[in-house]
Image (cartoon, rainbow, N blue to C red):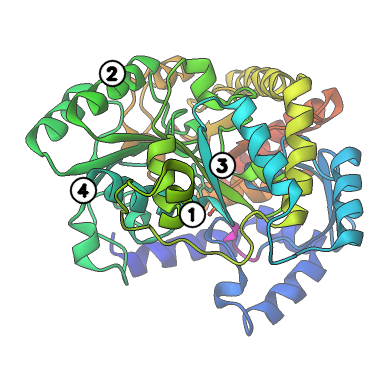
Amino acid sequence: MNQSSAVAEVLGRMADSAIVAEYRRRTPTSARFADEARHVLPGGITHDARHVLPYPLYVERAHGSRKWDVDGNEYVDYAGGHGALLLGHNHPVVTEAIQRQLERGTHFGTCHELELRWGALVQRLMPSAERLRFTSSGTEATLLAVRLARAATGRKKLLRFAGHFHGWHDHMAFGVSGGFDAPSSPGVLPEITENVVLAPPDDTQATERILAASDDIAAVIIEPTGASWGQVPVQPEFLHALRDATTRHGALLIFDEVISGFRCSPGGAQAVLGIRPDLTTLAKILAGGLPGGALAGRRDVLELLEFADVRAAELGTDVTPRPKVPHHGTFNGNPLSAAAGIATLEIVATGDACQRASDYAERLRTALNGVIADERLDWSVYGTYSGFHVFTNPAGESITADDIAAGRVDYRTLKSRPDPALLMKLRLAMLVHGVELFSWPGGPTSAVHDERDLALTVAAFGSALQMLKDEGEIGRR
Ligand SMILES: Cc1ncc(COP(=O)(O)O)c(C=O)c1O
């Protein structure tokens, strides 16, 4: 099917859907705002993951595990601030820290004590963070990681894994979903794409072959819990082999812990796996629900950011000056994000937030798979730690959650979306029953999701499946 007939097919199936009609009935104010937004924001949205047909939901306020739209409807929230809100919305300690800082100022344009405390806290939780540099987002952190890796190794190329997401800058803007074979995104220079090698995920031999065939690979970057927060799981053995191979071939290993950092455990995925990467990219939970990111890692690499005079003052004037890697950013380490980040990380460090969120996700995955079994569907819900993904098995293959977890299912099967209308209707059907899924579909869970959220989600899933059955979207096989 070509692209325009695929789009026409999706629109056709949405047009006469009872699910869409019910969504429209419940959300007239969102519809009105979305109409206005189309004249202001391209596509009416500010992030591709917020693309929803017939229009996205407009949310007015949130608290704990819940949020409320502009028409007053309440939802159990699995967007979780795109994974930033391990502690849920408006945790009182985090909110108080932000309010206190707000009164003192949001930007001093100078160094301040909070950035020091924030960085030291990260170092304590994540010992591989010998030094760190704050950024304003995860995308900026992965961008800086690539630049520093090249400067440190004198090599050009970056090795990435198909399906893994590392933000939206030029090196990362292709091979993440859908057309894995498409050479690049419109607007990205071929010279950049040529210097990014895309390897199949979880394939030790292919990775070893690529590393052995080139002495120009500066770094290998990976989400250590698998592509898109485990949508395509990765096996721990692969990660250990990768640590070994990168060391042997002189490439830096970058763990992208933008989601997994402070979520899998207080020390991130690396603490659970017992692997020390050379560099780690962080964001989301790091900044406690406000914008912020960081690149952390080996001192000798991060020191490439130092000014020569600072180095000379510390190490003596006989140290050969070397070119500095430039790095700016108006909001790097800003006091407000620092206050929220410190409050959040202190709770994560001393409590059981990571474990609670993971336990909830496990109960949720089990309960949703129970609904699937009752309905005799060939779907599965899977994931690790505090995440869940709904696999709708578009090709009707014999695939279980165990197959997916064990890495027996191809990444293209898990990441491609041959039936976007079904996924859109599933999300809408959940919304009309009071549950917001993230776009995968699935979501990160939080430490404040509770038994009532679980019961509501399970009931909503059952009702959503019924609606999908009623309009012939599922149950035909
Ligand atoms: C693993 C990973 N890396 C990088 C990013 C980019 O982070 P940001 O959206 O803060 O730019 C994301 C965002 O979802 C992510 O999940």
Instruction: State yes or no: Cβ of the residue under disc 4 lies below 8 Å from any atom of ligand 1.
Output: no
Q: Nearer the viewer, mark 4 or mark 1?
A: 4
Q: Is residue 189 above or below residue 279?
A: below
Question: Where residue 332 sits: x, y (%)?
Answer: 61, 58
Find out whether residue 210 is within the magenta segment: no
Name which of mark 3 and mark 1 comes first in the sequence. 1
Tell me which secondary structure the magenta stretch mostly adopts.
Answer: loop
Name which of mark 2 and mark 4 comes first in the sequence. 4
Mark 3 = which residue? 441
- For the residue labelled by badge 2, is the local secondary structure a helix, a strand or a loop? helix
Pointer 3 with pointer 2, Cβ within 8 A = no
Name which of mark 3 and mark 2 comes first in the sequence. 2
Q: Is residue 331 above or below residue 245?
A: below
Mark 1 = which residue? 139
Instruction: State yes or no: Cβ of the residue under disc 1 lies below 8 Å from any atom of ligand 1.
Output: yes
Circle on res. 241: 2
Pointer 2 with pointer 4, Cβ within 8 A = no
Which span is picked out in magenta?
50-55
**Total numbered labels placed on residues in the image:** 4
Residue closest to the eye, 81 or 103: 103
